[in-house]
Image: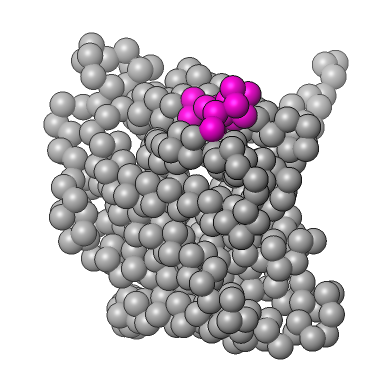
């Protein structure tokens, strides 16, 4: 008699070919975007490591340190990246819609690796020119915009609407994984040779770019066509609809509201991530973990209810009193403060994670498009580009307000949170009305 098949092997054999490819695409895009975040992280590690910040100041000006100005200098580098990223994002979706995603993403990752390495080479070759560092940051900000619309389009193509919230919530944890890995790598080299804090992540993202070129399948149809060995030279059918225009994407119901909502949600989220490590150094990585939890929770709830806007609105509504509670908690010592902070992080980041993933994918395949999936990249880019404006403005405002005390910063965050909530009200009403007519139907 033959030996029984081991349970592990039986489990692996239970998946069909499509499911394996789907899991592979999930893992690959996860790793690709992790490397994007990993390569963005060094500058913020640089910022909190004072000797290094002073070192860069010396490199740029070759003069004795002015302790008041070096933080503004590093701020300028952050903003040159964030502003280039926000502007570049609008263009990126439009370009990405018209090019093969695999090639577009590969070029983006290779150039991103190049510019990240160049920043580190400034240390190696002793470059004393602020313009060089600003140029590298702007160029990097522009090429990094190739990432998000491409990976969301890929995931949107491979995963249907059913459990998209949960799947994308889990998938979106690449942000935190990338940030933690980036912090560890940059932190490891920071005191000995800070050039390597940039060069190593730069090499990693470039290497992942090569892997992307070799393995990324952007649409399940590409596989079917390849396996049928169709005689058509193109990997897409001839009757494919043309890519959507920028204005056409704005006319999709919900795109404008979600974009503006994300502007305020991302403003709150980025202010949190940029400023709180300075406020409580111990909380850095635990915030990242709770940020993931917020995104997954938002995804699961919105899948169950079939209501993306309502889920975001409820979390935003709960976030405001939590932010206020956070300011009260600080007098009770570190433990309760960090506890409150984690709840805040989850509630603030849930809507942001949901809008940039499942909502973007849902709107990019909206029924008003009559099955034209060529809007996914443009819609994702419009939503995330608008959000990135908030990401650039938030920490800047916090910097100006923090001189008048932390309470001012928290009031600004609560105001932004309420504005995000207001922008969703029309969509929430629409979801609730459609639910009365047809229970359990999503607006997507």
Question: Number of marks in the image?
Answer: 0
Examine the rendered structure and indicate whether residue 436 appears above or below residue 64. Answer: below
- Magenta residues span 113-128
The residue at 83%/75% (across/down) is: 334
Main SS, magenta residues: helix
Q: Considering the image in quadrants, where does the C terminus appear?
A: bottom left
Residue 183 percent across, percent down from the top left: 70, 44
Q: Is residue 207 above or below residue 131?
A: above
- Display colour scheme: one colour
Question: Image quarter for residue 363?
Answer: bottom left
Where residue 378 sits: x, y (%)? Answer: 28, 47
Horizontal relation, residue 154 to residue 230: left or right: right
The percent coordinates of residue 38 (x first, y second) are 61, 39
Left or right? Give the position of 8 relative to 403: right
On the question of residue 202 being in view, the answer is: no
The N terminus, quarter of image = top right
Q: Quadrant of residue 201?
A: top right
Picture coordinates of residue 270, whole percent (x, y)? 54, 62
Rendered residue at 32%/21% (across/down): 225
| Extreme-front residue of the structure | 63
Instruction: Say whether residue 161 is magenta.
Output: no
Q: Is residue 115 magenta?
A: yes
At 33% from the left and 44% from the top, the residue drawn is: 88
């Amino acid at each position: 008699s033959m030996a029984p098949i081991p349970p592990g092997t039986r489990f692996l054999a239970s998946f069909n070919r499509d499911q394996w490819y789907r899991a592979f695409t999930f893992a690959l895009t996860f790793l690709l975007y992790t490397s994007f975040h990993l390569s963005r992280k060094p500058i913020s590690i640089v910022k909190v490591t004072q000797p290094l910040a002073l070192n860069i100041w010396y490199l740029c000006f070759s003069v004795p340190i002015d302790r008041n100005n070096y933080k503004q200098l590093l701020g300028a580098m952050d903003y040159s990246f964030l502003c280039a990223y926000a502007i570049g994002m609008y263009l990126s979706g439009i370009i990405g819609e018209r090019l093969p995603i695999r090639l577009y993403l590969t070029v983006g990752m290779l150039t991103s690796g190049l510019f990240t390495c160049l920043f580190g080479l400034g240390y190696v070759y002793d470059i004393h020119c602020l313009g060089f560092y600003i140029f590298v940051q702007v160029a990097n900000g522009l090429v990094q915009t190739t990432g998000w619309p491409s990976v969301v389009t890929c995931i949107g193509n491979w995963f249907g609407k059913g459990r998209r919230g949960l799947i994308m919530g889990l998938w979106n944890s690449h942000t935190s994984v990338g940030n933690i890995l980036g912090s560890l790598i940059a932190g490891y080299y920071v005191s000995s040779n800070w050039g390597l804090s940039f060069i190593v992540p730069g090499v990693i993202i470039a290497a992942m770019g090569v892997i992307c070129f070799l393995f990324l399948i952007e649409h399940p149809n590409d596989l079917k066509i390849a396996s049928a060995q169709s005689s058509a030279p193109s990997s897409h059918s001839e009757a494919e609809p043309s890519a959507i225009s920028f204005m056409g994407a704005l006319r999709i119901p919900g795109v404008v509201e979600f974009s503006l909502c994300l502007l305020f949600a991302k403003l709150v989220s980025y202010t949190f991530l940029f400023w709180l490590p300075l406020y409580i150094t111990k909380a850095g990585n635990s915030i990242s973990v709770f940020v993931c939890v917020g995104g997954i929770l938002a995804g699961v709830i919105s899948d169950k209810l079939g209501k993306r806007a309502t889920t975001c609105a409820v979390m935003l509504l709960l976030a405001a009193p939590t932010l206020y509670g956070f300011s009260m908690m600080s007098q009770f010592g570190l433990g309760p403060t960090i506890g409150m902070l984690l709840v805040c992080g989850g509630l603030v980041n849930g809507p942001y994670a949901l809008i940039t993933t499942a909502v973007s994918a849902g709107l990019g395949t909206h029924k008003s498009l009559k099955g034209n999936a060529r809007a996914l990249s443009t819609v994702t880019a419009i939503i995330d580009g608008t959000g990135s404006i908030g990401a650039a403005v938030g920490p800047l405002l916090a910097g100006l307000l923090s001189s008048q005390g932390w309470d001012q910063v928290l009031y600004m965050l609560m105001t932004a949170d309420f504005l995000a909530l207001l922008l969703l009200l029309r969509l929430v009403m629409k979801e609730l009305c459609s639910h009365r007519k047809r229970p359990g139907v999503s607006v997507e």
